[in-house]
Amino acid sequence: MAEARPRPDKIRCDACPVMCFIADGKVGACDRYANQNGRIIRCDPLTVLDRRIASGGEVKPFLKADWDGKLAAGDDLFVTAVGSGTTYPDYKPAPFLVSRDVDGVDFVTVVTEAIFSYCGVKVKIDTDRHLGAEGATIRCRGEAVGLMITSEYGSQMMSLGGVDHLTGGSKPEGRVTCDALMRLCNRESVELAVDGGASVVVQAGQPPIVDGTKEERMRVGCGSATIGMFAAQWDGLVDEVVVVDDHITGVVSEHQAGKVLGWPDTGIKIKGRRSTPGRYFQVAEPGLGWGGTDIQDPLTILGDWNPKKGARPGMTLLMVSTTGEQFGFYILDDNLVPQSRPLPETLKPSVDLIEENCEPALCTVMFMGGAGGSLRSGVTRNPVRLTRSVQQRKTVVTCGGAEAYVWPGGGITIMADVTQMPDNAFGYVPTPAIVAPLEFTASRDEFRALGGHDASVRPVEDVLEHGGEYGADVRAVAPKPIKT
Ligand code: SF4
């Protein structure tokens, strides 16, 4: 009788191109797979969203050992790709192809942890403070990981990661980029430095910390919009109001809102480029001061007051920032020079109203990736049919159960809010690339029509009882509350 061959010390993980050899009891290079008694297992359990938990129902850990075999209705449970494992190379069916009955219709969800080389995050940071010039390089631990992109209304925007930073630069650049992306997607904090700008600590769902100061409020609007919103609140209480803003500084006596109210001229002079009446660009340089400018003293944006156009001693002036955090009240002296005075009680409610209308400042992290590559082969033998089905909205794409926005046009380019996903939904492989959960859901008929791997489809009961190729542990969590 032939002798049994001694078990090799290490076995190979084939879940990604790195192909680690892993010794018994050890984990591979990505910490996601381990060798347990000579078998490659996925270290994290498969995550199932259980809507009964969200609605206050019974919390049932679907660990195989604990599960009593009873199932809720199919639409209560959603098998996410978190912990599902990866297939490599991609022509193999995805790790889980799960069928479930929803309102009498048979649906298939294809579940895989996808390896993304073409991916990154778009970060929206609610702040007026100037973080850096558009196009400026953003660094993490000294490595270039992205750039500042066009500001949005009340927010500064970053584009981080992408294939050029992951694969096109030096090894450290790729490694640091991958690590920063994974931590941001897992809702951890990451410190970033903008060339020629600020340092900012970013964490999804949390306020940004700019140069060590936590941002409290998102501005109510630009200076012109603030005048438009609150001009009537100031009418009759003060002679002039200036809302200081890096983008559009507003002046009530000149602004259309003031004109409609019959506001008299004041002879005020604003330094800056006049756009339209009562709206001024470039009153100062961008910075961390009033309204996202670099000024600490708002009077520096004023020129001489003109008595021929209405300026007179005793005239009152309110200057306020777009968040209401900074304000000053002044009275023109005999030489028409503004002198600082305490804010009158009558004006406090209007300043408070600006503050009250500011929303909390938050960081938003949107994962963005291209799912139009080889991973489609884990769904179908004819990948373009999946692309077409997604574009026709016959197949729904989710990331860890979170709804994904699919960009129009070619391919399957998705964007998803990381705060809507289960904890630690993202991983990495040291190629370097990000591992993200991805689910495609279609009716069984559509799945068959697009050439899906129908023979590999298993009922959800079977998945819960037997797990998959890389293990059987399953955890149930509540879906994230839908943002309103
Ligand atoms: S990096 Fe991870 S997934 Fe890739 S072969 Fe190694 S253990 Fe497996």
Image (spheres, rainbow, N blue to C red):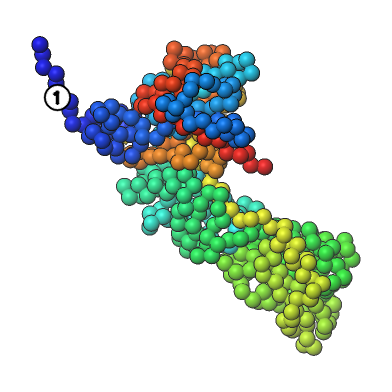
Residue 49 x %, y %: 53, 31
Question: Which residue is at a point 38% across and 54% down the rendered structure image?
Answer: 143
Q: Quadrant of the C terminus?
A: top right
Answer above or below: position of 90 versus 44: above
Where, quadrant-wise, is the N terminus in this rendering?
A: top left
Numbered-mark total: 1
Q: Which residue is mark 1?
A: 6
In the image, taking residue 11 as reference, residue 447 lies left or right, namely right
Relative to the observer, which residue lies in front, 3 or 188? 3
Left or right of 393, for residue 368 = left
Three-letter amino acid code at disc 1? Pro
Q: Is residue 334 left or right of residue 440?
A: right
* Whether residue 326 can be seen here: yes
Q: Is residue 402 at least partly visible in the picture?
A: no
Location of residue 448 in the rendering, given as x and y in whole percent from the top left corner: 52, 13
Q: Nearer the viewer, residue 141 or 240?
A: 141
Say left or right for 208 vs 472.
right
**Vertical placement of 46 versus 183: above or below?**
above
Residue found at x 44% / y 21%? 465
